[in-house]
Amino acid sequence: MNSAEVVVRRSAAEQANLETMLHETFEHGFPFNRVIGLRLESLDLHAPRLAFDMRPELIGSLIHNRLHGGVIATALDTVGGFAVVLAVAEKHANETAEQVLTRFGRFGTIDLRVDYLHQGVGRSFHAGAKVMRLGGRIASVQMELKNDEGVLIATGTAAYIIS
């Protein structure tokens, strides 16, 4: 970057507005996220996290009382998308919250792989993600889901279209 260039960043008020909009969108805007009970746990660009509690509606095995695999995949996909939104918001730090959310409306999962490592047993679950590459059109992300005792339940990788 040329030393004469100035990077324009959104104001603290606009950043707070973005964070409020992200909370509203991810926790309340998607009906399925509400069914699962996903909530934002961290908006840290380098360690975004979502969490949810075990409930009877999420059981995939009555005999073992464990989490449904589709819930695991959804949590990983959602935290991956959330990480991409944060990365795009940082990349376009001069844009308003509304502009960032407009960009988000064009995102989509184009590939998702989930590796189920342990039974989904626990009182609560925490999903984290790391953006490995943020290109102009595609973002690549690695995700993980742990239970409240820190047991790694599943890992995932995904690619998202971002343009």
Image: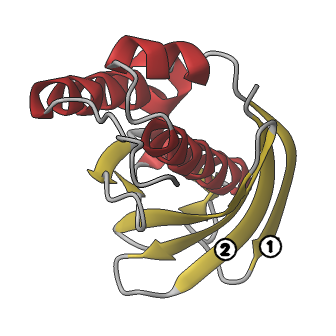
Is label 1 in a helix, a strand or a loop? strand
Report which residue position mark 2 lands on.
154
Locate residue 119, reporting x and y percent: 64, 78
The quarter of the picture where residue 68 lies is bottom right
Q: Quadrant of the C terminus?
A: top right
Locate residue 34, reporting x and y percent: 42, 28
Q: Amino acid at mark 1?
A: Asp
- Seen in the picture, residue 58 relative to 49 is either above or below; the reply is above
Between 82 and 38, the residue placed more toward the observer is 82
Separation (CA) of disc 1 from disc 2: 5 Å
Q: Count neighbours of disc 2 (C-alpha within 10 A) and say few if under 14, some if 14 to 19, many if 20 or more.
A: many
Locate residue 27, reporting x and y percent: 36, 30
Q: Residue at x 48, y 63 (%)?
A: 127
Q: Farthest front residue?
A: 4
Residue 53 seen in render: no
Q: Amino acid at mark 2?
A: Ala
Is label 2 in a helix, a strand or a loop? strand
Locate residue 72, reporting x and y percent: 63, 57
Q: Residue at x 47, y 22 (%)?
A: 100
Report which residue position mark 1 lands on.
115
- Which label's residue is closer to the chain start, 1 or 2? 1
Residue 72 seen in render: yes
Between 147 and 17, the residue placed more toward the observer is 17
User: Seen in the image, is 48 located left or right of residue 24?
Assistant: right
User: Seen in the image, is 25 located left or right of residue 159?
Assistant: left
Asked if marks 1 and 2 touch (Cβ < 8 Å), the reply is yes
- Seen in the picture, residue 146 relative to 48 is either above or below; the reply is below
User: Seen in the image, is 87 located left or right of residue 140?
Assistant: left
Q: Residue at x 62, y 55 (%)?
A: 76
Between 119 and 87, the residue placed more toward the observer is 87
Q: How is the image coloured?
A: secondary structure
